[in-house]
């Protein structure tokens, strides 16, 4: 059986081509951690962890996990999970927290990546093979892009858009003005709204009434409020699918919201689920409950996105009405050389998509940035760490 020779953690600081500015944050880039697993025969697999938390905390957490499983056997992946999670104290309270879930997801991806290459198959093959190979895709736009909407968005290629409301707005009137602008540009385009939990229950009900009057093609309203019990009430009154993401930070929270009937669409990737195997079983559970999954991309073409999409493809947890969020797939600052096939609003995948090449030049450059002390915080303003004040209205 294949034995792990070494697991390496490579910190990377990746600058953005365009700064991301919101009502509560200004981001110049992202810091992630590339996980490189090498088997004894020198077969190499890759995973990644997006820097959701402080970079020093994440690096120490990853090192602690890797120390628990380095030089073990691949067939002991379940034992490795136990060693990494329990021995690193991530299950001390009986629940895997979001930091532990994200770190393990990146490590487990690298393990499965190396193993699949060793035996000559794709990662989806290890989970039963691709069942769904086409998914609706939504292109991510900013409210500032609306003036150039038709120029920037290829409407023959993309049939849906994804837009955050409260990220750039502080009132329902601003949200509705944005939606009216979209309708003037294109009445038929599918719209995925992300409110980031900024609405109150009264605002959410008012928003639903106004959106009904507009007759928009709404595919999903994600996280209109933050409280699960209120989300359920909104879902019961809405004719549009209600999605959740922020309150899904570990496997237990996902199960809890399935049982309570909180939402129609669960926005998931390997990080919230705590790894590939967890995501597979959770997606199968959602499928059997008649619920849907939206797969989220973090930034440019990423290992975590194609892996999450690959796991989702082995289930029936998604359907034609569930769009995916896609960012800039032409980004030359990507870690992987991969371009998805997108035709008529659908992303098409096959086993060859999982044989992507690593961009060694970019990895070397971004690792240099990290070693020089460049760190990118998710919540930052003028290069200083801040506690963001999220809008709530």
Image: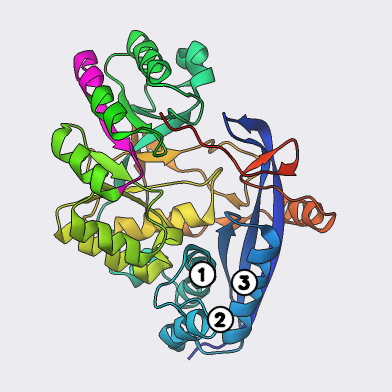
Q: Which of marks 2 and 3 precedes in the sequence? A: 3
- Between the C-alphas of marks 3 and 2, the distance is 8 Å
Q: Position of residue 209 (x, y in %)?
A: 21, 21
The residue under label 1 is 100
Q: How busy is the neighbourhood of tag 3: few (under 14 within 10 Å), some, or many (20 plus)? A: some
| Horizontal side, residue 282 vs residue 15: left or right | left
Residue 213, compared with residue 347, is above or below; it is above
Q: Which of marks 3 and 1 precedes in the sequence? A: 3
- Mark carried by residue 88: 2
Q: Secondary structure at mark 1?
A: helix
Q: Position of residue 285 (x, y in %)?
A: 21, 64
- Between the C-alphas of marks 2 and 1, the distance is 9 Å
Extent of the magenta region: 209-227
- Between the C-alphas of marks 1 and 3, the distance is 8 Å
Q: Secondary structure at mark 3?
A: helix
Q: How busy is the neighbourhood of tag 1: few (under 14 within 10 Å), some, or many (20 plus)? A: many
- Mark carried by residue 61: 3
Residue at position x 38%, y 21% in the image: 172
For the view shown, which residue lies furthest in the right direction? Answer: 372
Q: How busy is the neighbourhood of tag 2: few (under 14 within 10 Å), some, or many (20 plus)? A: some
Q: How many marks?
A: 3
């Amino acid at each position: 059986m294949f034995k792990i020779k070494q697991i390496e953690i490579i910190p990377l600081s990746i600058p953005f081509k365009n700064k991301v500015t919101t009502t509560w944050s200004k981001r110049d880039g992202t810091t992630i951690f590339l996980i490189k697993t090498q088997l004894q025969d020198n077969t190499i697999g890759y995973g990644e962890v997006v820097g959701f938390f402080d970079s020093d905390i994440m690096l120490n957490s990853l090192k602690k996990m890797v120390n628990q499983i380095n030089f073990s056997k691949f067939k002991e992946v379940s034992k490795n999970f136990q060693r990494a999670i329990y021995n690193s104290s991530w299950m001390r309270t009986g629940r895997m927290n979001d930091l532990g879930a994200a770190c393990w997801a990146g490590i487990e991806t690298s393990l499965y990546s190396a193993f699949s290459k060793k035996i000559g198959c794709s990662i989806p093959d290890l989970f039963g093979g691709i069942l769904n190979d086409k998914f609706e895709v939504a292109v991510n736009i900013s409210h500032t892009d609306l003036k150039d909407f038709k120029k920037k968005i290829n409407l023959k290629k993309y049939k849906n858009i994804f837009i955050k409301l409260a990220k750039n707005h502080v009132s329902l009137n601003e949200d509705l003005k944005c939606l009216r602008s979209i309708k003037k540009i294109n009445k038929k385009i599918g719209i995925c709204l992300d409110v980031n939990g900024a609405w109150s229950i009264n605002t959410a009900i008012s928003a639903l009434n106004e959106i009904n009057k507009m007759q928009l093609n709404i595919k999903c309203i994600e996280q209109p409020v933050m409280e699960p019990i209120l989300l359920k009430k909104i879902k019961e009154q809405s004719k549009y699918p209600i999605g959740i993401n922020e309150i899904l930070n570990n496997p237990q929270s996902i199960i809890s919201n399935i049982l309570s009937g909180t939402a129609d669409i669960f926005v998931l990737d390997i990080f919230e689920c705590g790894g590939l195997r967890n995501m597979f079983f959770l997606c199968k559970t959602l499928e059997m409950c008649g619920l849907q999954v939206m797969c989220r991309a973090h930034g440019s073409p990423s290992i975590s996105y194609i892996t999450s999409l690959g796991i989702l493809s082995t289930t029936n947890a998604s359907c034609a009405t569930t769009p995916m969020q896609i960012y800039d797939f032409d980004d030359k600052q990507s870690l992987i050389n991969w371009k998805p096939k997108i035709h008529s609003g659908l992303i098409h995948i096959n086993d060859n998509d999982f044989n992507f090449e690593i961009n060694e030049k970019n990895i070397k450059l971004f690792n240099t940035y990290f070693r020089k002390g460049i760190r990118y915080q998710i919540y930052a303003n003028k290069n200083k760490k801040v506690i963001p004040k999220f809008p709530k209205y």
